[in-house]
Image (tube, grey):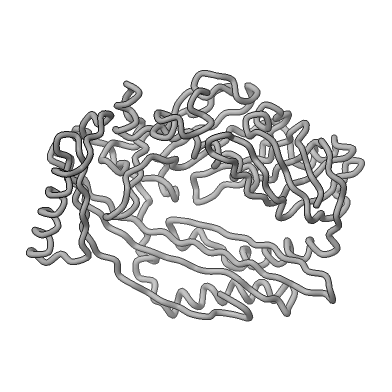
Amino acid sequence: ILGRGIKEATSRLDLGLGVRVFKNKGLGVAFTQSLEPLDVETTIRRAIAFSRTAQPDPYFQGIPEPSKASEVPGLFDKEIEALRLEEAGELARRMIEAVEGVRKEALYRGSLLAGHGKSLLMTSTGVDVESEGTFISAYIAPTYRDGEDVGSSYEYDVSRSLADMDFEKIGATAAKKAIEQFRSRRIEGGNLPVVLSPDTTQSLCGALLAASSGEEAAKARTFAYNLLGRQIAPASFEIKDDGTIPGAISSSTYDGEGVPSRPLKVVSQGVLVSFLHNSYSAGIMGVKTTGHAKRMGYGGYVGAGPTNVMVKPGDGTMDEMIEEIQKGILISRASLTPNMVSGELSSTIDEGFLIERGERAHPVKNLMIGGHIVEILKRIELISKEGRTIGRGHFFPAIKVSEVRLAGK
């Protein structure tokens, strides 16, 4: 989706085989997009040859043994499997029409992506697991002009099931949020309380979970490497990761190494209690894998990362948080991504509102948020009981932070 409507629509089939061979702790990797017997044999030989010349990795402890798990239901949808390109285009048009129903004359960016995938993982230790799933994602970002004034925003959703998607709601919500950004003003910076919308909470927690990768922590490549067992937030702040939720977008029966998925407390009563491990990082740290191996396609690197991330809800509401603030900022959208080594954050607030005397006053522009991500977490005062559920699995509430450094531009 680009400009005034749909620019292009494409479909493709991605078929391939990846081979990883370990020899004397050296790793050889090769892949092919052909499943012809000769090409498969050549790929295997290449991986073996690469493993013989690879630098030995002293941290390598071996690959996981097989383990059985109950299948996570609801990960496949026949409607998505049968979705044709023309039908997908009609779904995208429904988003555009919903935007136009709120206000016409928008310029657009956006996309609709649907997929159906099957995979088979086999190892020399006896792991032999198959998986099949579907997904659909959609977003639209309208921009309106009123003379010299500009209002823009976006809205999105993701699911395993077509029936879960409300394309009209996505479009209408995006339009209303864009209109709210008209007449934005510059304000002076300072140390002020802020309210993070659920979408902004998602960004903050996503950064923390990325920093909690076991491999990055084991090699001291993340600011969180020495935070295990330490208080990083108030006791009311808890994060659970669960890849076993039925029908959830990030669920799977097994992780990228064939280890059963399982629920995991990452932050408990404000304490970082676990990293996200694959077998490699678990071996380095002398612990068991947490079932968080992530395989980036048949030719990619095997890392570690989160599944369905859920922040424990609190007692208040976002409106109550705003009502308590004499002067502060509601951050509706911002990419709170810190430097992963230092933890220092310096990000533009993409959408936000000045709060004055307990009410939203007007949208703000050219405002930045800064500070160390752990210091921001430690200053959490309130967590809302309501929030946003994404793809049936992720849950993020609104959060009030007592004080954050803001800089006007």
Residue sitting at x 82%, y 64% = 182
Residue sitting at x 79%, y 56% = 365
Residue sitting at x 39%, y 65% = 80
Residue sitting at x 27%, y 41% = 257
Specify the quadrant that holds the N terminus: bottom right
Residue 30 in the image: above or below residue 143: above
Left or right of 242: which side holds 45?
A: left
Left or right of 254: which side holds 235?
A: right
**Residue 299 drawn at (x, y percent):** 27, 55
**Residue 53 drawn at (x, y percent):** 16, 44
Q: Is residue 230 visible?
A: yes
Q: Nearer the viewer, residue 95 or 234?
A: 234
**Residue 27 drawn at (x, y percent):** 21, 42
Left or right of 166: which side holds 62?
A: left
Q: Is residue 67 visible?
A: no
**Residue 379 drawn at (x, y percent):** 71, 28
